[in-house]
Amino acid sequence: MKSKIAEDKYAKTVKACREMGPEQRLAAFLHHSQAMAKLHQAGARFRDRGGNRRHP
């Protein structure tokens, strides 16, 4: 079963992406890449501190 709200959000996101210019797409890609790098670094720090001890 698909969510009508999720489908609407997805359609709006696709439409917004198609309306972006090349510079806007590049800026969005940069922002996304930086956010993913921070998330990856946070996970590495968590693991280095011995996080999630229930699953060795």
Image: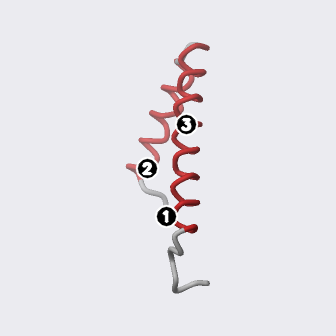
Q: Position of residue 51 (x, y in %)?
A: 50, 74
Q: Is residue 41 above or below residue 19?
A: below
Other-residue count near label 1 (Cα within 10 Å), few / some / many at <14 / 14–19 / ≥20: few
Circle 3: element type: helix
Q: Residue at x 53, y 17 (%)?
A: 24
Q: Is residue 14 above or below residue 9?
A: above
Q: Position of residue 31 (x, y in %)?
A: 52, 31
How far, Cα to Cα, is label 3 from label 1? 34 Å
How far, Cα to Cα, is label 3 from label 2? 25 Å
Q: Amino acid at mark 3?
A: Gln
Name the residue that disc number 2 marks.
6
Q: Earlier in the sequence, mark 1 or mark 2?
A: 1
Other-residue count near label 3 (Cα within 10 Å), few / some / many at <14 / 14–19 / ≥20: few
Q: Amino acid at mark 1?
A: Met
Which mark, by number, is residue 51?
none
Pick the residue in front: 11 or 28.
28
User: Can you say which quadrant of the picture contains the C terminus?
Assistant: bottom right
Q: Is residue 56 left or right of residue 24?
A: right
Name the residue that disc number 3 marks.
34
Disc 3 and disc 2 in contact, CB within 8 angstroms: no
Q: Earlier in the sequence, mark 3 or mark 1?
A: 1
Which mark, by number, is residue 1?
1
Circle 2: element type: helix
Q: Is residue 56 above or below residue 20?
A: below
Q: Position of residue 4 (x, y in %)?
A: 40, 51
